[in-house]
Image (spheres, rainbow, N blue to C red):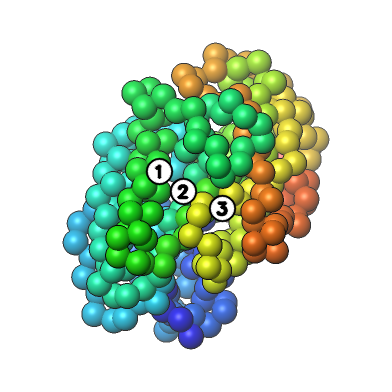
Amino acid sequence: MKRFLVTGGSGFIGSHLCEKLISENHRVICIDNLITGNLRNISHLRDNSNFTFLRQDVTEYIDLDEDIDCILHFASPASPIDYLELPIQTLKVGSLGTHKALGLAKAKGSSFLLASSSEVYGDPLVHPQREDYWGNVNPIGPRGVYDEAKRFSEALTMAYHRVHGIKTRIVRIFNTFGPRMRKNDGRVVPAFISQALSGEPLTIFGDGSQTRSFCYITDLVEGIVKLTNSEICEPVNLGNPNEISITDFARLILSLTGSKSEIIFKPLPVDDPKVRKPDISRAKQELGWEPSVELEEGLKKTIEWFSQDLGLGTSD
């Protein structure tokens, strides 16, 4: 049994990661201030003797009595709506929160994994995006609060690795979807599914030609666990390299839900990336990892969850 601390553990990805670690009989301490997390995501874990939830802001001093083998730092607003509404909190958790989490790792002699993001690449000028690409980020734009928070987190993580010899890992997460996503978090998957199930128009921002690559949550979590157990200190892209345009994605959602909703178009937000596709060569070679869940299979599971959990019915 290993002892894990997961910051942001009641969020979408964090809760699935806690669940995975518990299923492997590890001890998990989940820390979350619930600004964007939800206790419902971890309710099924609360009675497990190997699971503990602590409501705390990771930008403040973290004091734990027990030993920790590995810290998985997932605390941060992560959706466009969240970090545009909470810009200062986003910057604080990326800087102060990462500093506190790394300080705890140093004090406990534990390893550390940072949940970074494909947003460190900004609106990329290379395609697909490799880990050695430095990115094209507008530091003073509205999205810069998230992009630069993650970039600073990576820099701080590597500084602790070089100066203090901490065993660090950095995962750059590309678009991920699955059950427990919030209906109104601004991401395209929950937006399109909830609109389709409710019979509302599917809203595309821009002309719909922009592309994304969608990875199902179980594939991502499997990759994170493999990275945690590896010896790789350089950033590793985790995501699904199968690319699809937003217009084609909207049509796929309509087909899978049987919805008769129309598609409408609105202006593209400032600095919204035109393409997003991971090069996962490093993950394949170093971790033996690549996604296995097909897009339609993952979407069917996600649609079923939204329909049941949120009480939404398929459109007539």
Evaluate whether residue 205 shows in this view.
yes
- Secondary structure, mark 1, is helix
- Secondary structure, mark 3, is strand
Q: Which residue is mark 2?
A: 116
Name, please, the residue furthest toward the front.
Answer: 162
Q: Which residue is mark 1?
A: 150
N-term-proximal mark, 3 vs 1: 1
- Decide which of 313, 60 is in the foreground and name it: 60
Q: CA distance from mark 3 to mark 1?
A: 14 Å
- Residue kind at label 3, given as amino acid type: Val
- Residue kind at label 1, given as amino acid type: Lys
Q: Please give the name of the residue rendered at 30% of the width and 60% of the height, measured from the top-left corner.
A: 163
Say if mark 2 contacts mark 1, CB within 8 Å: yes
Tell me, for residue 236, which label it has, or none: 3
Q: Please give the name of the residue rendered at 66% of the width and 15% of the height, measured from the top-left corner.
A: 207
Evaluate whether residue 10 shows in this view.
no
Q: Quadrant of residue 31?
A: bottom left
Disc nearest the viewer among 3 and 1: 3
- Decide which of 117, 193 is in the foreground and name it: 117
Residue 222 in the image: state x and y as whole percent: 62, 64
Residue 257 in the image: state x and y as whole percent: 75, 39
